[in-house]
Amino acid sequence: MKIAIIGSGYVGLVSGACLADFGHTVTCIDKDAFKISALKRGDIPIFEPGLESLIVRNLQDERLTFTTDFAGPVGEADAVFIAVGTPSRRGDGHADLCHVYEAAREIAHALRGSTVVITKSTVPVGTGDEVERIIREECPHADFAVASNPEFLREGAAIQDFKHPDRIVIGVESDLARQVLMQVYRPLFLNKSPVLFTSRRSAELIKYAANAFLAMKITFINEIADLCEKVNADIQEVALGIGSDNRIGSKFLHAGPGFGGSCFPKDTVALIKSAQDYGSSVRLVETTVAINDARKRAMARRIIEAVGGNVRGKTIAIFGLTFKPNTDDMREAPSISIIQALQDAGAHIQAYDPKGMEQARMLWSDVAFRSNPYDAAENASAICILTEWEQFRALDFKRLAKLVATPIMLDFRNIYSADEVTRHGFAYFRIGAASRTGPAPTNVSPSEQEAVA
Ligand SMILES: NC(=O)c1ccc[n+]([C@@H]2O[C@H](COP(=O)([O-])OP(=O)(O)OC[C@H]3O[C@@H](n4cnc5c(N)ncnc54)[C@H](O)[C@@H]3O)[C@@H](O)[C@H]2O)c1
């Protein structure tokens, strides 16, 4: 099949590379000429494990091309995917659909022959109707159908998710769309990946409902973690205990500093807004968003309390900036609110992230970015792990203890056990369990020792 993909970001690039790898002829289109010329050279603008080699291989095999030109590739395509961004609209939090509608208008002018236009971007219920209306208005005689095919890939595991999905959701209102999408996903049909054909509106809602449910699950375990701290229980034991129940499941039961990323924050708010517009508010989701927003700043207060109530003039080391490991995506990362709150309280931040620092530099000019965790820890009054990158799982605590001003470790991803950390003299704080102090640290002043205790 000939496929055009509008928008060459995380979703467009991963979808384009994987569909080319299935054997289709794919053109990825983006209006960002700088991005497209980099992609043509094989320079990938995002970090996603395995993506670079997949793109380079398919470029070499001439199944994948990149362009800023709509007319040629859209005119020839059997299927045109819209994979542009749908960020929160400034002011009211609705999904901003301007890029989707702009893409629809450009597609309309380029259509030739029978084409299926598929929305892969996350869009509110009814957007498919509007895309259809726009194309029909711009090009009344076009032979086209509009479908919804929401994407469920996770950054950091995107290629695996695209090629081995839990399910593929396809919302169609016509036979043409059904037939074309069956051809597009034929390799996955053959692999027995579950394919769910639904109405277009159901498909649009499935994506938001799925993300809202997962955000709710994370928020639930975060609240239970707070309760664990009060009653001297351990969230990891509780999560294991409830997650072993098949009806609940163990995934998304990891307590942490609150959810972030390019999807959950904006999608939960967009769902709330469109539900309100339909007079059917989703109060569980509203509460989830409010709890999560408050949680991120509360995490900064924990750090401040751990160093004795005052961070003014002190250095705090931040290990991990991205919203999760294996991505360079900084969108809505908890680190943003936490660092902001620490800076507001007068702290000096030294940070290290294996892949996110290029993006992070665009956010902060007043954070000292270091090239490894040990440099970031130098002279720090506390170390805080915000992202569970693999390389933070085996830190050299002996070395860290010599570098820091005060041996305090706040592990907001629960990647260590208290024993592993406290035996090196660190006070250890994690989410959902009582904090633990180690043997009296040797390289701290008496006042700082008080703060540790
Ligand atoms: N990132 C994820 O993990 C993920 C997962 C599932 C679904 N989604 C959804 O997929 C959509 C895309 O997300 P993303 O993270 O890939 O976004 P992104 O911001 O990384 O990429 C969007 C791209 O679209 C381009 N673009 C915008 N308007 C255009 C136009 N009119 N013509 C051509 N190109 C245009 C931009 O230049 C940009 O390169 C969003 O709706 C998002 O919610 C994202």
Image (cartoon, grey):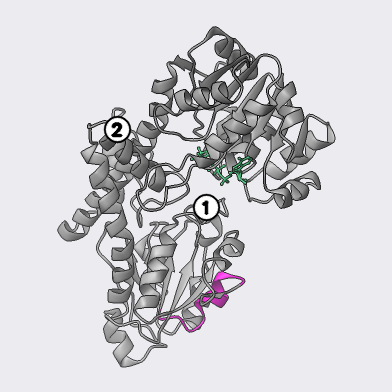
Cβ of mark 1 under 8 Å from ligand 1: the answer is no
What segment is highlighted magenta in the picture? 371-381
Name the side, left or right, on which 69 lies relative to 378.
Answer: right
The residue that mark 1 highlights is 325
The residue that mark 2 highlights is 248
Q: Is residue 373 above or below residue 220?
A: below
Name the side, left or right, on which 13 lies relative to 364.
Answer: right
Residue at image x 52%, y 35%? 121
Percent of width and height locating residue 443: 42, 88
Q: Is residue 107 visible?
A: yes
Where residue 58 sits, quadrant-wise, is top right
Counting labels gives 2
- State the SS at label 1: loop
Where residue 23 sits, quadrant-wise, is top right
Can residue 234 be found in the magenta stretch? no
Amino acid at dot 2? Ile
User: Between marks 1 and 2, how big is the CA–CA gap?
Assistant: 24 Å
> Foreground: 397 or 261?
261
Q: Is residue 431 visible?
A: no
Q: Is residue 172 above or below residue 22?
A: above
Amino acid at dot 1? Pro
- State the SS at label 2: loop
| Ligand 1 shown in quarter | top right
Residue at image x 50%, y 23%? 133
